[in-house]
Image (spheres, rainbow, N blue to C red):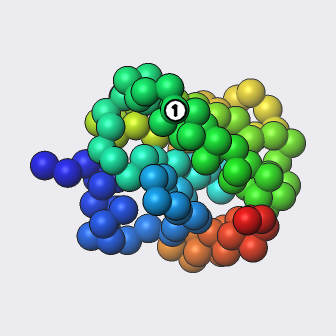
Amino acid sequence: MPSIFSRIIAGEIPCHKIWEDDRFFAFLDIHPYRPGMTLVVPKAEIDNAFAMDDATYCAFLTAAKKLVPAIKTATDAARVGLMIEGLEIPHAHIKLIPINTAGDMDSTNAQPATPEELATMAERIRTNLHA
């Protein structure tokens, strides 16, 4: 059975897409720790990021890195934290979290975002993406 992320990538479940290329897909988390929290996932259903071959893993991190300046600008964050934990969904993913303090990366901060908040934030991030 496809993971929820595979279903999002396939368009079966709606999302607020930020960016994609032929190998990776980025979209806003609907329960962000901080507004603008973005998930980057491989289009191939890979359970564990650390099981990727080195070239794919490096490309995965590079894809995430491309999004950081746009997220930082759109959210006015001091930094963007990166987290790879992968326990809740069996599909590798990077969490890019706009942060001003270390506590901003705490999952207990997660709050559901409204569709309107997500749409506005997605547009702000996409506007700041540089090809």
Q: Which residue lies at the image location 13% right of the left edge and 49% below the top edge? A: 1
> Residue 124: image x %, image y %?
73, 71
Q: Which residue lies at the image location 82% right of the left edge and 48% below the top edge? A: 77
Q: In the displayed structure, would residue 6 be above or below residue 10? A: above
> Residue 14: image x %, image y %?
37, 71
Q: In the visual, does 47 lie left or right of 26?
A: left
Three-letter residue code for mark 1 = Ala
Q: Is residue 30 something one can see in this rendering?
A: no
Q: In the displayed structure, would residue 12 be above or below residue 101? A: below
Q: Which residue lies at the image location 38% right of the left edge and 52% below the top edge? A: 43
Q: In the displayed structure, would residue 79 be above or below residue 15? A: above
Mark 1 is surrounded, within 10 Å at the Cα level, by few (under 14), some (14 to 19) or many (20 or more) other residues, namely: few
Question: Which residue sits furthest top?
Answer: 50
Q: In the displayed structure, would residue 4 be above or below residue 59? A: below
Q: What element carries label 1?
A: helix
> Residue 38: image x %, image y %?
58, 52
Location of mark 1 (residue): 55
Q: Which residue lies at the image location 79% right of the left edge and 32% below the top edge? A: 101
